[in-house]
Structure formats: structure tokens, C-alpha cells
Amino acid sequence: MNSIYLDYMATTPVDPIVLKTMLPYFSEHFGNPSALNAYGKTARDAVEFARAQVAKAMMTEPSGITFTSGATEANNLAIFGLAAALPPHKRHIVTLATEHKSVLAPYERLAQQGYEVSFIKPQADGLVDLKTFAAALRPNTGLVSVMWVNNEIGVIQPIAELCDIVRQHEAAVHRLPSDDKAQVGDIERIYLHVDAVQGLGKVDMNLATLDVDAVVISGHKIYGPKGVGALWLRDGLASKVQPMCMGGGQEQGLRAGTLAVPFIVGMGKACELVILRQQDDWQHAMDLRHAFLAGLAKLGDWDLNGSLEYRVPHNLNISFTGIDSETLRLAVPSLSLSAGSACQVGKMQASHVLKALDLPIQRCQGAVRISFGRHTTLVDIATATDMFITAVNRLRVGAGA
């Protein structure tokens, strides 16, 4: 039996249309976009066309888009670059305890460098409590990072509401006595950075109406190639961000290095397709999720981790009572899924996301992430649920449960 792929939040296959668009830029149009010749101009034009495609998917201007090697680099660039731009009296930074490691690790490094860091624990359903979030902000808060859609449990954080809280707090700080702040101006802004890697193509993204400062996306989560991502920065902010990679001055000086033209072209095309397919993809995922949960209704003693209501339908994170996730994964070898986050491969430890929800350790250790995509079928779901039911019942009998 062929494997059934249920790990679309780890990565997606490159869409055939995307691949076809990329291929000429590996050999026929192979020029360096920085070169001042005809081949360079062809490559440069392709990059700028892709930049416009990415910007359109995010409903913003192309000038704010910087291409990177992926979301990890983009998150690092945003966090370290914005933190370095903060004045000494604004070195308190805030994020959620359930963020991706490419956000948490930079925050931990900044804590070692003397920044004050607050890690907010969400509620048991994975959503941040708005009052708790507001209370975490201080007069010296300079940077906030929030993931739009969680990569492990799929919950959708209320970005617009969180943005309003940040801006209201910012306005209140500006009304404090002059000895509590420096002059009011752009440098007093609280920078709001959003990891939207799992959001693009799933939730409506309109940066023209969302008062955020930095947004990160990735190519391989939207049926584009691996090895390419993008950082969007609010107009005027690029000059304040300290680059991590310096050299030839590419990408407005924010990210030096020869651009990976085929990958950038592929990401642009994937973003174009996202606009066309988002609504259909959402409904397809809803149908698949409904079928999966209906199938599991025949099986008792399992828990859904994270809110079901405020969640993308492409994701389910489920714990089966009495069974650890790795044992279950090995018991269903024909199903490709994640026993925890895909970024924790080879580590037998409970997910930091689930631990942050204060779930029992057995439930954390028993969690598997199941994620659907464009190519998943209802037949796949029926087969997968039958496999889960058979495997779970067999493992429970074997354990004497």
C-alpha cells in the first residue's frame, strides 16, 4: 500500500505549475540578477515579478518584500534586526511560549544579551488571553512577536485584536510624563512581528489594513519550493533593521548574497496560486477534517489539542489515551504524519507547545499532528481512520488498557 501523506504543515509538494514556471531559470535564464547584462536583466525582471506576486498575496506593496533562504532566516532577521534598532529604554520584548523555535531561540539569545523577555503562556485551548497579553506590555516594551497560525496545533491567534492592544498601549505610553519616555516618534513604536508561515494560503491576509511591522512567510508551506522565504517590513522600516548577512548589498542591503532566482520565481507563482485556490483549499480541508473526526468517533478516549473553533481546518493535533505518539506512529507505517512538531525529529520529548498549555505529560507525549492538503482525498481519510482505530485498539489491548 502506498503511504498516505498527512503532514502538510511540515511541508507541501511543489505544485506542477510552480515547477514548470521554475525550470527555465535553472538553465535557460540562469543569469545573476545583480549582473548588468542581458542575462542579468532577465533574471532581475523575474525576481521583481515574483516580488509583486508575493506582495499581492499579502495585499501590500512589493517594496516591502525581502527574499531570504526560508522562514527561519526571515524570523531571525526580523527579531535580531528590530531588537538592535531599539533604544536602550525600550529593550523589553514579548512573545508567546508556543511560538516556533525560530522565534523562541532568538528571544532566548536576546535574553542572554541583556534584553528583558516575557514569554506569555496561552490558555488551555492555545489562544492567548487578551487581558494577559495586554498586561504583559510595559512602558519599555519595544518588540512583540506572535505567530498567526500555530504550526503544531493550528490555532489562529486574533492578530487584529492583538495589534489593537499594542497600538493602544503605545498611545498610552506616549501620554506618560516626559521622564518616562523619550520624544514621541517612530522610534517609540512597539514593533509587532508576525510569523505568518502557516497562515498564508489559509487565512485572509491584508497587510494594507493590519498595523503590523514585520511579517514572515515561507515557500514550501504553500506548494512552492524549499529554500526560499520572505520578510515583509512596514514602509520606512528597512533602513532601521540591522542586517545579519552583509556583502554585495542585495535586497536593499538587508540580505546580501546572490538571489536564488528559480526558487524566488517558484515562490511567486505559488503565491499567485494561493490567491486563486485559498477558498477552495479551505473548504476541501473542512470536508476532510469533518470526515476524519467522524471516523474517529468510533474510537473512545482521545483528546483534541487546541481550539477546534479558532483553528485552520488543515490541522488536527490529537492525543490517544494510554499510547505514546512514537509507538502509534510506528504502528501505522503507511501514514506519514508527525509525532509532535516536524522540527523535533529524533528527539523523544514532549512538544513545548503542548507543555505550554499545561496539558498532562501523558497527553503531551501521546500527541500526533495530522494535517491535510490539496491532494488529500476522502478515500485517504477513510483509510487513515480505519488504520488509526485498528492500531489504537491493538496497542491498548497489548498494554492491558
Image: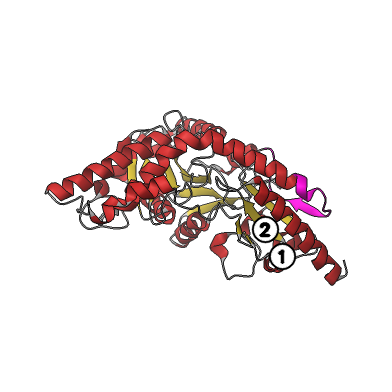
| Stretch in magenta | 294-309
State yes or no: discs 2 and 1 in contact (Cβ < 8 Å): yes
Farthest left residue? 37
Direction right: furthest residue:
400
Amino acid type for the residue under numbered disc 2: Val
The residue tagged 1 is 328
The image position of residue 274, as x and y in percent, is: 46, 39
Query: Quick check: is 108 in the magenta stretch?
Result: no
- The alpha-carbon separation of the residues under discs 2 and 1 comes to 8 Å
Determine the main secondary structure of the stretch shown in magenta. Answer: loop
Quadrant hosting residue 388:
bottom right
Identify the residue at image location x=67%, y=52%: 317
User: In front of the other: label 2 or label 1?
Assistant: 1
* Nearer-N-terminus badge (2/1): 1
Q: Residue at x 64, y 70 (%)?
A: 348
Marks counted in the figure total 2
Quadrant of the rendering where the C terminus is positioned: bottom right
Q: Is residue 124 left or right of residue 244?
A: right
Tell me the residue that label 2 is attached to. 368
Kind of residue at badge 1: Leu
Residue at (71% x, 44% y) in the render = 291
x and y, in percent, of residue 238 in the image: 31, 43
Q: Give the camera-side residue of 122 and 250.
A: 250
SS class of the residue under badge 1?
A: helix
- Where does the image place residue 356, in percent across and percent down from the top left? 65, 55
Taking the image as shown, residue 194 lies to the left or right of residue 321, namely left
What element does badge 2 sit on? strand
Q: Position of residue 208 (x, y in %)?
A: 41, 29
Circle 1 crowding by C-alpha within 10 Å: few under 14, some 14–19, many from 20: some
156 and 28: which is toward the camera: 28
